[in-house]
């Protein structure tokens, strides 16, 4: 009797907490309440461990202190941007504080191995500093190539800092290569350390992760995209391989914005103040295009990434092409894509045919019928896990980075992206997207309509529970 009363009281308290928690999507509230009522003990414990997005008070304080202590990134004056695109950059600025900045150039390596080779070449050419941050860094062939390049750079006097997510890169951290970098003089840091797992929930939610992929070299060159520091064979999940990624090498003042973002992360998880590096702004030639870093995460404005995606989608007039491995939108994002299709925009969404996350795969397909009915062209890429996160808008604007179109990227992960306005660079991205499209199979309305009832039931059930999963 007493145990039953305790369980009921804990359910009531948890439901009240769910209802009072600020910035929670109504669908998320309903899902958590349903779980707490359906499986009382498991639901209450689940909410205590995974229901709220906090990295811990001390960590939040360090992040805010780092943000305040760092000087703003210097660079060129704000460029002229066509009036129709200015609101797109204003949203990004309202999130991260970085304005659009001109004078940038970019290129895209052909594939993942070429990207790693180019990153290694940039590290080998560095003269002042190299800063590297990856969510997943594996001690495989490509991972070791970057390790060796950093050790070489440190040996010749270049200041090197390497940072990883504590869970995503745990294999590297436990390997001899992590220790070898430290012994060679590379400064090391781990974001969101887990520590003792049973006590970890007392200091913030354990599954909040630093999902960013940042490389900055001499304040002049930066890399941004979807690729982790690993082989495309991605042996930790080899049956879904190859991982198909897109990375962009940018040169220009936008590198200083990525440098500022790296410095915030570094000073949040490491005691070293590296603000002085932001004062070392190199000269850049005139010309180039406008670009802007957009960062998001649990300690940054709520719903930041959904706002970015929705603004871009509503800004499309002719064409919108999106590739993402994980599509589990909130209601507003799904409505935005459907609205674009209904108003005559040529919308193409490319997803992987096989997903490494069963829940995401099921939830994604629950949205297919509505998207197809709105006129969205929907394709599934069969040749590995399409991991590229790209969006092109009217052949003029590109968003590239680490953020997926799912609730984890919206609410739980620290992400970094770059928004740019340039026809030539967007054409490069658009050509890469076309390669994915050419290799993909188009999903039809008739095919989705023919799915058996149990499959539709399963997909919809998982989608309903996606805020919890």
Image: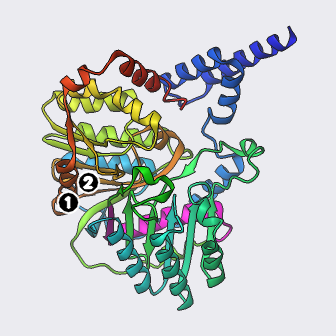
Looking at the image, which residue is at 16% across and 50% down?
438
Query: Residue 228: x percent and y percent?
Result: 45, 61
Looking at the image, which residue is at 46% across and 26% down?
462
Is the residue 397 above or below the residue 7 in the image? below
| The residue positioned farthest toward the front in the image shown | 239
The type of colouring in the image is rainbow
Looking at the image, which residue is at 71% across and 28% down?
45
Name which of mark 1 and mark 2 comes first in the sequence: 2
Discs 1, 2 touching: Cβ within 8 Å: yes
Is residue 116 visible to the viewer in this orientation of the structure?
yes
- Indicate yes or no whether the magenta region holds residue 107: no
- Residue assigned mark 2: 398
The one nearer the camera, 91 or 366, is 366
Number of numbered markers:
2
Q: CA distance from mark 1 to mark 2?
A: 8 Å
Is the residue 452 above or below the residue 273 in the image? above
Mark linked to residue 228: none
- Residue assigned mark 1: 422
The one nearer the camera, 255 or 428, is 428
> What's drawn in magenta, residue-wise?
247-272
Query: Residue 113: x percent and y percent?
Result: 35, 69
Is the residue 1 above or below the residue 131 in the image? above
Q: Secondary structure at mark 2?
A: strand
Looking at the image, which residue is at 57% across and 29% down?
22
Magenta: main secondary structure: helix
């Amino acid at each position: 009797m007493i145990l039953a009363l305790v369980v009921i009281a804990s359910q009531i308290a948890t439901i009240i907490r769910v209802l009072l928690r600020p910035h929670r999507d109504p669908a998320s509230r309903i899902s958590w309440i349903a779980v707490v009522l359906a499986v009382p003990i498991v639901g209450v414990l689940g909410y205590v461990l995974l229901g709220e997005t906090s990295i811990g008070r001390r960590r939040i304080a360090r992040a805010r202190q780092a943000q305040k202590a760092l000087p703003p990134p210097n660079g060129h004056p704000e460029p002229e941007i066509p009036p129709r695109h200015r609101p797109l950059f204003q949203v990004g600025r309202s999130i991260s504080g970085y304005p659009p900045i001109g004078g940038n150039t970019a290129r895209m390596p052909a594939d993942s191995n070429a990207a790693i080779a180019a990153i290694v070449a940039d590290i080998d050419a560095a003269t002042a500093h190299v800063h590297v941050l990856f969510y997943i860094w594996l001690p495989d062939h490509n991972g070791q190539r970057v390790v060796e390049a950093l050790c070489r750079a440190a040996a010749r006097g270049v200041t090197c800092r390497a940072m990883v997510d504590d869970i995503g890169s745990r294999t590297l951290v436990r390997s001899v290569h992590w220790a070898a970098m430290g012994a060679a003089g590379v400064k090391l840091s781990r974001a969101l350390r887990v520590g003792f797992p049973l006590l970890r929930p007392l200091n913030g939610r354990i599954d909040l992760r630093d999902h960013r992929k940042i490389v900055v070299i001499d304040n002049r060159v930066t890399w941004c995209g979807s690729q982790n520091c690993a082989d495309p064979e991605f042996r930790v999940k080899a049956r879904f391989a190859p991982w198909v990624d897109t990375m962009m090498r940018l040169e220009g003042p936008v590198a200083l914005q990525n440098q500022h973002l790296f410095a915030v992360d570094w000073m949040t998880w490491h005691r070293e103040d590296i603000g002085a590096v932001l004062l070392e702004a190199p000269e850049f030639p005139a010309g180039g295009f406008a670009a802007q870093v957009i960062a998001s995460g649990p300690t940054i404005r709520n719903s930041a990434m959904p706002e970015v995606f929705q603004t871009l989608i509503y800004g499309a007039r002719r064409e919108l092409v999106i590739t993402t491995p994980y599509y589990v939108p909130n209601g507003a994002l799904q409505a935005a894509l459907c609205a674009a299709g209904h108003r005559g925009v040529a919308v193409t969404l490319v997803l992987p045919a096989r997903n490494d996350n069963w829940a995401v795969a099921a939830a994604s397909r629950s949205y297919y019928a509505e998207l197809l009915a709105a006129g969205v062209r929907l394709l599934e890429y069969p040749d590995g896990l399409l991991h590229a996160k790209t969006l092109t808008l009217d052949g003029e604007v590109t968003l590239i980075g680490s953020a997926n179109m799912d609730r984890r990227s919206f609410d739980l992960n620290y992400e970094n992206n770059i928004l740019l306005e340039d026809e030539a660079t967007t054409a490069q991205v658009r050509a890469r997207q076309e390669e994915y499209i050419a290799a993909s199979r188009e999903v039809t309305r008739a095919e989705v309509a023919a799915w058996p009832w149990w499959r539709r039931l399963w997909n919809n059930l998982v989608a309903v529970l996606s805020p919890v999963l």
